[in-house]
Image (cartoon, rainbow, N blue to C red):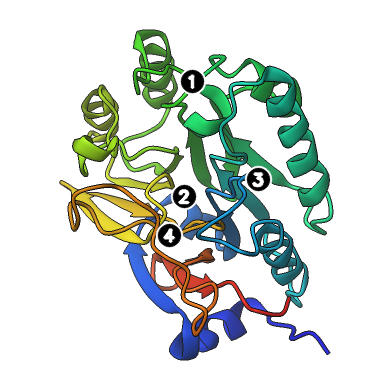
Amino acid sequence: MKPSFDRRDFLKFAGIGGLVFASGLARSARAAAGDDFYFVQLSDCHWGFEGPPNPDAKGTLKKAVAAVNALREPPDFVVFTGDLTHITEDARERRRRLAEFKEIVSELKVKDVRFMPGEHDASLDQGKAFRESFGDTHYTFDHKGVHFIVVDNVSDPRALIGDDQLQWLGADLSKQPPDADIVVFTHRPLFDLYPQWDWATRDGAKAIDLLLPHKNVTVFYGHIHQENHKMTDHIAHHSAKSLMFPLPAPGSQPKREPVAWDPAHPYQGLGFRNVEAEVAKNDFAITELPVQKEA
């Protein structure tokens, strides 16, 4: 029998195999609305990848979908923060992988599912194939008093957001009050985590400068295939684990190579997260969840 968890069970489960990280986020608008909510973040699925270090390359995404579907209380929405597929120079193969990914995640019971590209999806064709399957690469939406902004820092192969999108971001932020509750989703880190490994956005500092006048901002991203927490002034940045293979800590070894699969601890370093907005505490509780051997 498959386990079934509600969101509070998720937080209890964190004491066994996950991690709860409290991030001070929304204060005014969400508190006024009085509604708790939570979402699930998945990242770096790399559908189409084969070979070492993941002998279950075609299984981890499906296991994650099954785990989300096993929740007794479904999340308000699910977000995939890039690298839905593994890179290929073959345009037809790129579209085939995107279509297969889309079919797999269509099994999610939650119908509000948000997508953004990673460089594996978009850098070779400036996001053309991604847009054909999923729509705009950058956009906004609002949910229960929180303003969400999706920033595309991958479609430009130079790892740039670009002037046009920065102008769009500035125009959007100008409509938000200084105490607005803002969450940014992006793929690459906006700050210079480790540029030597392409763990940066070349004009990310400009985006952070646009965000800084707002008191309540948090960024969720992917790309680095591991959990990482960083503050730039009062802005919290949280990276997500991968569903395909983990990568080493920034600068911990000479080359950015995937961490080897450990047969004694399968799926070690892989996972996804539950992010719960807790109005009473005025923060988000981030629960890191592992990929399980059996879905």
Dot 1 or dot 2, earlier in sequence: 2
Q: Which residue is mark 2?
A: 29
How far apart are labels 4 and 2 at the CA level?
36 Å
Residue lying furthest top: 164
| Circle 2: residue type | Ala
Could you classify mark 2 by the number of other residues whose Cα lies within 10 Å: few (under 14), some (14-19), or many (20 or more)?
some
Please indicate, yes or no, whether residue 195 appears anywhere in the rendered image: yes
> Could you tell me the amino acid type at mark 1?
Ser
Q: CA distance from mark 3 to mark 2?
A: 37 Å
Residue 136 falls in image quadrant:
top right
Secondary structure of residue under mark 3:
loop
Q: CA distance from mark 3 to mark 1?
A: 18 Å
- Circle 4 residues within 10 Å: few <14, some 14–19, many ≥20: many
Q: Residue at x 50, y 66 (%)?
A: 270
Spatial distance from mark 1 to mark 2, Cα to Cα? 32 Å
Q: Quadrant of the N terminus?
A: bottom right
Q: Which residue is mark 1?
A: 155
Q: Position of residue 44 (x, y in %)?
A: 53, 48
Identify the disc placed on residue 246: 4
Q: Nearer the viewer, residue 115 or 271?
A: 271
Q: For this rendering, which residue is in front, 135 or 96?
A: 96
- 113 left or right of 117 in image: right
Q: Which residue is mark 3?
A: 47
